[in-house]
Image (spheres, coloured by chain):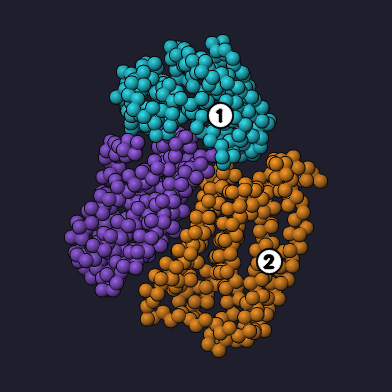
């Protein structure tokens, strides 16, 4: 797996979000996207999974442009945005089961795996709670629990550390290292520098 | 790739500056000739008298209102599929022009309706589908103005225009069908103007004039659209300073 | 897999039974306003009741499809649709069907009651029922398309109806004319066939169109 971002530029309402961004990410690398609020971290990550489009430049995943119709980049990508992508009217368990509808790498009848994922992030006690009843931190944990269920190689995470308590942050970073060991690539935006806790990282600094 | 696209806009913007004003003046002259031809030279209709002469504005306007929609949808399609900026601008700038033609067609249709039908408005198939066309145009313009990101707005309105184009024949057919069902005895369908060559020629000429008018307005509006989009860009600032 | 998806849709609607009852109540409320405004003249209502029913049906479908994707947009579920590696068209299709099942079907099921209230003959009310059965899925899916078009906007209260209603016209015309024909004793099968054609044209295309529209309106 390899992600290559080549002189990427993105505008919004005639304002430059980022210009001439270049980065190469290889197997087992983690890219920490840093910068102040409103500098376009979210937009950059959304561009990587084509929720938003670049105005110029290109993004190649395994040497295939993601704009290409033939590209099956989505087969390798899991995106967890700032919004949690959880359905408020479903319980935590149902939400995690629902993931199977969007991700073919999730084992369909994986009751135990879902339980493990919930236990990893310490939300098993909320398994029958409606998502609307959870605190922000627990919502975040629920959406991050998908990372355990999915087998996809590339993780695109927008502010994964926000709302998390210390233990959960530690758990998440452990999860990152595990994913790196099997050769996965992680792109995570953060305003908090966690590079001390991970190996093989790259910074992608953004400015206003 | 992007550079060529920006250059394309710049090329259009700089090259059309002179053409645009020349075209407007030319159209005005053509229009005056056409009006004179239609109002004074063309013979009086034996059935409708002089009132039929409004046809020389009404019919071309109605044609153009449809044609503009087709152009809007076609350019919108090109813009969506091949992502050509100039086509995006052309597509959205067609909407107000088309709405204008539709209003002209409706108003002249009403004025023509008074001597022909005895009332200003009859729910006749053609007038009704023209009214629906106006609503389609209004929908597109409202949707465009609602989005703050105009590039996104253009994509959305192009899609709506394309879907609308598929829908227009269905609407037209169904309205016609509805009209034949509800054709009351009081409404006399006015006869089609006899296709005498002395009457038809000015009509075709006016159609041509309206097309020229459409073209000149479209170019003017596209220049305006390019200016609004690129006003913060370097080449536009340079042009302004020149 | 499909069974799970259907189950999820059912759960969602059963947890919010308000979404099922409110359109129904709204429908009856509007229907009963007409006699209050126009007077309880039986002859008048014999003529206009199909129109009244259809206008009310339009208002109901507009209301229930207006903010169809709004919650999913705010929760980020739409983003998950767009980054899904499986086809979401099936999900979108099921969601259209579910929306119809829970907002329009109750109204259709209560048509006999409306027929009683306005003393519509059996044959007439049967045709009204058939046209509603074939027309409302079209209205709902067009309405959902409209709501997808305006999804990128912060507010879209009245914009979606303005965009969508012109697209409703063919369905309305053919439905109304079928009902007219049956009350005049004329054949009405052609209108029904056209409605059916429209239905089978629009339903299969709609999920793909919706996905494309969502891509465009999220991408800002």
Q: Position of residue A24 (x, y in %)?
A: 64, 24
Q: Please name whichever residue, B111 or A48, is drawn nearer the observer in this view of the structure.
A: A48
Which residue was labeled with disc 1? A45
Q: Is residue B153 above or below residue B212?
A: above
Q: Secondary structure at mark 2?
A: helix
Which color has been applied to chain C in this rendered view?
A: purple
Q: Please name whichever residue, A187 or A164, is drawn nearer the observer in this view of the structure.
A: A187
Q: Secondary structure at mark 1?
A: helix
**Mark 2 packing: few (<14 Cα in 10 Å), some, or many (20+)?**
some
Left or right side of C106 for B33: right
Q: Position of residue B138 (x, y in %)?
A: 51, 57
Which residue was labeled with disc 2? B212
Left or right side of B32 for B161: left
Same chain under badges 1 and 2? The reply is: no
Which quarter of the picture shows residue C80? top left
Which quarter of the picture shows residue B198? bottom right
Left or right side of A78 for C120: left
Q: Is residue B182 above or below residue A5?
A: below
Q: Nearer the viewer, mark 1 or mark 2?
A: 1
Picture residue at 60% right of the left edge, 85% below the top = B196
Q: Residue furthest right?
A: B242
| Chain of the residue that carries numbered disc 2 in the rendered image | B
Which color has been applied to chain B in this rendered view?
A: orange
Which quarter of the figure is the C terminus of chain C placed in? top right
Distance between the alpha carbons at the discs numbered 1 and 2: 47 Å
| Chain of the residue that carries numbered disc 1 in the rendered image | A
Q: Residue furthest top?
A: A196
Q: Position of residue C51 (x, y in %)?
A: 31, 63
Which color has been applied to chain A in this rendered view?
A: cyan
């Amino acid at each position: 797996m390899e992600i290559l971002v080549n002189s990427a530029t993105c505008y919004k309402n005639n304002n430059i979000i980022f210009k001439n961004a270049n980065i190469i990410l290889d197997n087992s690398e983690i890219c920490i996207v840093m910068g102040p609020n409103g500098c376009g971290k979210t937009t950059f990550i959304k561009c990587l999974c084509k929720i938003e489009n670049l105005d110029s430049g290109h993004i190649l995943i395994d040497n295939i442009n993601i704009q290409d119709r033939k590209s099956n980049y989505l087969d390798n990508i899991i995106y967890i945005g700032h919004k949690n992508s959880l359905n408020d009217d479903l319980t935590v368990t149902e939400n995690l089961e629902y993931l199977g509808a969007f991700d073919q790498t999730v084992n369909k009848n994986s009751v135990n795996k879902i339980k493990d994922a919930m236990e990893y992030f310490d939300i098993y006690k909320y398994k029958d709670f409606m998502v609307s009843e959870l605190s922000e931190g627990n919502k975040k944990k629920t959406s991050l629990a998908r990372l355990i269920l999915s087998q996809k190689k590339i993780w695109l995470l927008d502010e994964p550390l926000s709302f998390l308590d210390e233990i959960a942050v530690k758990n998440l970073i452990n999860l990152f290292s595990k994913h790196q060991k099997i050769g996965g690539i992680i792109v995570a935006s953060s305003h908090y520098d966690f590079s001390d806790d991970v190996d093989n990282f790259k910074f992608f600094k953004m400015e206003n | 790739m992007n550079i060529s696209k920006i250059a394309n806009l710049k090329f259009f913007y700089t090259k059309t500056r002179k053409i645009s004003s020349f075209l407007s003046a030319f159209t005005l002259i053509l229009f005056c000739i056409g009006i004179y031809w239609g109002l004074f030279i063309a013979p009086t209709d034996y059935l409708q008298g002089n009132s039929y002469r409004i046809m020389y504005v009404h019919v071309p306007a109605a044609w153009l209102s449809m044609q503009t929609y087709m152009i809007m949808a076609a350019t919108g399609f090109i813009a969506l599929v091949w992502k050509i900026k100039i086509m995006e601008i052309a597509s959205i700038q067609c909407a107000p022009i088309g709405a204008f033609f539709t209003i002209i067609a409706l108003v002249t249709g009403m004025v023509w309706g008074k001597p022909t039908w005895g009332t200003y408005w009859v729910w006749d198939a053609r007038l009704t589908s023209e009214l629906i066309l106006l609503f389609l145009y209004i929908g597109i313009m409202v949707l465009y103005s609602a989005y703050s990101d105009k590039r996104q707005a253009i994509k959305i309105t192009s899609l709506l225009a394309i879907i609308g184009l598929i829908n227009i024949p269905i609407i037209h057919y169904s309205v016609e069908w509805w009209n034949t069902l509800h054709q009351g005895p009081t409404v006399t369908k006015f006869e089609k103007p006899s296709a005498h060559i002395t009457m038809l020629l000015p009509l075709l000429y006016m159609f041509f004039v309206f097309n020229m008018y459409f073209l000149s307005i479209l170019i003017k509006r596209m220049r305006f659209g390019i200016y609004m989009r690129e006003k913060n860009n370097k080449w536009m600032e340079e042009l302004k300073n020149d | 897999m499909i069974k799970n998806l259907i189950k999820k849709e059912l759960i969602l609607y059963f947890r919010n039974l308000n979404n099922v009852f409110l359109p129904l109540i709204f429908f009856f409320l509007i229907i009963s306003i007409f006699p209050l405004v126009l007077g309880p003249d039986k002859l008048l209502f014999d003529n206009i009741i199909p129109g009244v029913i259809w206008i009310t049906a339009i208002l109901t479908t507009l209301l229930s499809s207006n903010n169809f994707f709004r919650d999913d947009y705010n929760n980020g579920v739409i983003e998950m649709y767009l980054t899904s590696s499986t086809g979401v068209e099936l999900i979108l299709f099921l969601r259209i069907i579910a929306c119809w099942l829970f907002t329009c079907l109750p109204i259709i099921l209560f048509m006999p009651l409306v027929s009683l209230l306005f003393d519509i003959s059996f044959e007439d009310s049967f045709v009204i029922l058939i046209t509603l059965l074939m027309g409302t899925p079209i209205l709902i899916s067009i309405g959902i398309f409209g709501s997808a078009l305006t999804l990128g906007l912060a507010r879209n209260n009245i914009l979606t109806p303005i965009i969508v209603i012109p697209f409703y016209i063919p369905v309305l015309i053919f439905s109304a004319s079928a009902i007219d024909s049956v009350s005049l004793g004329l054949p009405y099968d052609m209108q029904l066939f056209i409605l059916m054609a429209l239905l089978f044209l629009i339903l299969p295309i709609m999920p793909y169109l919706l996905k494309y529209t969502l891509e465009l309106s999220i991408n800002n």
